[in-house]
């Protein structure tokens, strides 16, 4: 088990959330790939979008079919945001792009969650690798990620 995957599994376990990462036969780097792999609606995929915010990052967990509106995101963060580069994402979260989990980050970030995800009983999120995902109730994801539910989709 990779360090990234183990960190996510441990985070879920310590929080008492009965969700186990699942390895998919193919990649789940994109929301479309993940939705196809788990056979769910595109919007049931909780995408982790990372923006650089000063010395740290801001995480926007959005429904798979939605895009983050940079102006709305910056307004929520109270500062100008820019897409974080791959090195920053790995340094702050501990995950590589394509497998960024919304939980288990190395460094805490400000987190917002797309209200659309609350329309589902279960959503699926990356579990730290491009081939692992985990199911979770949206309310549990909000609590575990320390997220604020907000409107930021384009």
Image (spheres, rainbow, N blue to C red):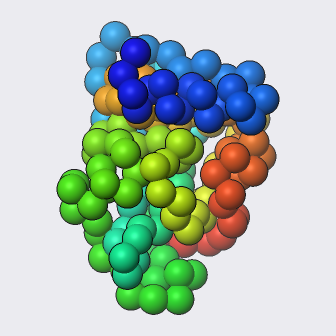
Q: Looking at the picture, tell me which residue is in the foreground, 34 or 65.
A: 34
Does the image show residue 51? Answer: yes
Residue 18 against residue 138 in the figure, above or below: above
**In the image, is 125 to the left or to the right of 36?**
right
Instruction: Point out residue 153 in the picture as x, y percentages from the top left corner.
Output: 51, 67
Identify the residue shown where x is 22% and y is 62%: 85
Q: Quadrant of residue 37?
A: top left
Does the image show residue 66? Answer: no
Q: Quadrant of residue 80?
A: bottom left
Q: Looking at the picture, tell me which residue is in the foreground, 19 or 25.
A: 19
Instruction: Point out residue 41 in the picture as x, y percentages from the top left corner.
Output: 54, 34
Instruction: Point out residue 2 in the picture as x, y percentages from the top left corner.
Output: 36, 22
Residue 78 against residue 143 in the figure, above or below: below
The quarter of the image holding the N terminus is top left
Instruction: Point out residue 93 in the picture as x, y percentages from the top left corner.
Output: 40, 51
**In the image, is 24 to the left or to the right of 19?**
left
Identify the residue shown where x is 53% and y is 42%: 104
Identify the residue shown where x is 47% and y is 57%: 107
Residue 146 against residue 141 in the figure, above or below: below
Identify the residue shown where x is 21% and y is 56%: 87
């Amino acid at each position: 088990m990779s360090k990234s995957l183990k960190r996510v599994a441990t985070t879920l376990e310590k929080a008492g959330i009965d969700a186990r990462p699942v390895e998919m036969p193919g990649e789940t780097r994109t929301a479309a790939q993940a939705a196809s792999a788990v056979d769910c609606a595109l919007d049931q995929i909780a995408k982790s979008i990372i923006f650089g915010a000063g010395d740290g990052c801001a995480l926007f967990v959005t429904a798979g079919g939605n895009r983050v509106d940079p102006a709305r995101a910056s307004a929520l963060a109270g500062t100008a945001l820019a897409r974080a580069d791959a090195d920053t994402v790995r340094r702050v979260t501990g995950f590589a792009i394509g497998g960024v989990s919304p939980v288990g980050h190395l460094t805490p970030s400000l987190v917002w969650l797309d209200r659309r995800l609350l329309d589902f009983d279960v959503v699926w999120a990356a579990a730290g690798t491009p081939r692992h995902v985990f199911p979770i109730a949206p309310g549990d994801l909000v609590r575990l990620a320390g997220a604020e539910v907000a409107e930021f989709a384009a």
